[in-house]
Amino acid sequence: MYRKQKSLAILQLLSKLSYRKILLINGWDELGKTVAIYTNKLVMRTSDELKKRSLKEKTSYDLVIVFSPTKSDLDFISKNINSDSMEMLCVSNSKYTYNNKSVELYQKSLNSESDALDFSKIKQVVLKYENCSHPMEYSVFPSIYNPELILSRGGLKYYRRYWSWKKSIMERRVFIYLFELICVKYLKIFSFLPIKILKVN
């Protein structure tokens, strides 16, 4: 499977196979082309474009996927989108992580703003949404472009070693993977994971 195709693995977190209308914020083109298969109508916007939009009444989306959301992105969603039957995926990167390369690859391809919120602040804002209860938290290993594992916070105990000692030594990444193995499998630490996903139904 090509790397661009593997990056679509986060769509496995979705609850349905098809959606009437999807809003994709700060997404990359390859993702947009595949998401379009899931819906009758796909709307793609950047954070900067949303700042310039003001809707007279709330509109309905079955699904919202937002990468590195800003406070204004989440405010727009809250004020302008009917959340009664909305599903949402918020993807963000950690500011402090053991795998900076994963974060750099993620940030490089996004149409995002520098004032993106960190994961804890995203949770604080989203939990204030109407009808929002018990959002699920996930992380992608090793990166969103080449995912081998997608685990929930509670599922970190199912972490398995997807990398080889020999290859990691050759690529000079053995200490990164070793740190990941210790933090995730044994210590169950979620804080320093490079890419995190918040799912809201």
Image (tube, grey):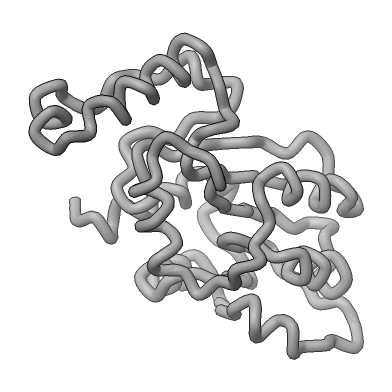
Question: Can you give x and y, in whole percent of width and height, for residue 159 in the image?
Answer: 40, 20
Q: How many marks?
A: 0
Q: In this view, does 159 lie to the left or right of 155?
A: left
Task: Out of 100 and 190, give the one closest to the viewer.
Answer: 100
As drawn, 176 above or below 16 = above
Residue located 39% across and 56% down the image: 104
As drawn, 41 above or below 114 = below
Q: Is residue 182 left or right of residue 96?
A: left
Question: Can you give x and y, in whole percent of width and height, for residue 105 in the image?
Answer: 35, 57
On the image, which quarter does residue 133 sit in?
A: top right
Task: Out of 43 and 177, give the one closest to the viewer.
Answer: 177
- Extreme residue toward the top, this view: 186
On the image, which quarter does residue 165 sit in?
A: top left
As drawn, 196 above or below 185 = below
Whether residue 65 appears in this view of the structure is no
Residue located 48% across and 14% down the image: 157
Residue located 48% across and 30% down the image: 151
Q: Is residue 184 left or right of residue 95?
A: left
On the image, which quarter does residue 68 sit in?
A: bottom right
As drawn, 54 above or below 193 = below
Task: Out of 147 and 122, give the one closest to the viewer.
Answer: 122
Q: In this view, does 31 lie to the left or right of 81?
A: left
Residue located 44% across and 39% down the image: 140
Whether residue 123 appears in this view of the structure is yes
Question: Can you give x and y, in whole percent of width and height, for residue 174 in the image?
Answer: 22, 27
Question: Can you give x and y, in whole percent of width and height, for residue 38 in the image?
Answer: 49, 65
